Amino acid sequence: MIEIKRATARKNNGLSASQEDYLEAILNVADASGTARSTDIAGTLGVAKPSVTGALKLLAQRGLVNYKPYGCVTFTQKGVSQAGRVAQRHEIIKSFFVNILRVDAAIAQKAACKAEHLLGPVIISRMRDFTKLSKKKVRQRTKR
Amino acid sequence: MIEIKRATARKNNGLSASQEDYLEAILNVADASGTARSTDIAGTLGVAKPSVTGALKLLAQRGLVNYKPYGCVTFTQKGVSQAGRVAQRHEIIKSFFVNILRVDAAIAQKAACKAEHLLGPVIISRMRDFTKLSKKKVRQRTKR
DNA sequence: CAAAAATGTTAGCCATAACTAACTTTTTCG
DNA sequence: CGAAAAAGTTAGTTATGGCTAACATTTTTG
């Protein structure tokens, strides 16, 4: 009673987990430092610099970032929206883990980083609903 | 605010997601058919037969299964316990998705297959507690 | 402004884990 | 029993996505 789709073999559309990680890292680095520098992305993801170069080229091929050697990376429109979606999923999952499962923020953070690549829209949306509901309840209890 | 450990580079101990999938598949096939035949494992996981051979050799190296060419696969003691742990995680996650998040069994099943490899003990245990609690509440409501 | 430091890239390598084609072994059945 | 079918293996290829070493470019600073 198992059924699995190998994550290898990116057919055509859809980003790999790794690519989503890079998008998210770029977003976060740019948020924090204004620009997304390669070294910071590498630092954020814990990979070596050449890995970043490779990833940026891939993302550029997919039309998600503007990459120019030795220049600084920016998102394309498509890139912004994709990165945003990943970040949203991350946030929903993390909030759920923290607010519903009552897990440490650090643990929730790491788990969300991994889970964000594989939980589908149905589960994510249930998590969001759940968290929202719980917050509403808290507001009611505290008679805000 | 991200931090990621690449899943590549199995250092020494700890199974890869793929290896855990094989353990689980062997368990399920053996449960269903009495013995774990290569073809059934391949069918269960949706991989080609040579992939199974390769995986079995790896698992044998790690002392988790007894592998003999053209013979049928059995677990070692270590293998049984590892496979059991994976299956347990799977079940906890699936139950949580179904009973708490109210997600379709099929969707929960697929998501659990993926999540079981990356959610850590803290989150898994919270999920289990949550599901258990909810079942108790249901028993109370129905005055069993 | 030029040399040193920092940053980024290229080239080449490694590991995981899939695949196909061709072969061997085992099982099944006329 | 023995030939065909089924099951399993081997060998070789592919893709992803890391890595290091060495080189190129940009930035910083004395």
Image: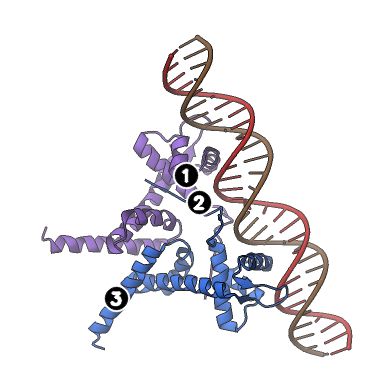
Chain colours: A purple, B blue, C brown, D red
Q: Residues within 10 Å of mark 3 (few under 14, many from 20)?
A: some
Q: Do the residues labelled 3 and 1 touch (CB within 8 Å)?
A: no
Nearer to me, B72 or A56: B72
Q: Mark 1 points at which residue?
A: A46
Q: Point out the tag, 2 or 3, that comes first from the N-terminus.
A: 2
* CA–CA distance in space, label 3 to label 1: 39 Å
Residue B134, given in percent of the width and then of the height, sits at 29, 76
Residue B134's mark?
A: 3
The kind of residue on which mark 1 rests is Gly
Is disc 2 surrounded by few (<14), some (14 to 19) or many (20+) residues within 10 Å?
few
Alpha carbon of mark 2 to alpha carbon of mark 1: how far?
Answer: 8 Å
Question: Which residue is denoted by mark 2 in the rendering?
Answer: B6
Q: Are marks 2 and 1 in contact (CB under 8 Å)?
A: yes
Lateral position of residue C30 relative to residue B120, left or right: right
Q: Please, is residue B114 above or below residue B141 in the view?
A: above
Amino acid at pointer 3: Ser
Q: Do the residues labelled 2 and 3 touch (CB within 8 Å)?
A: no
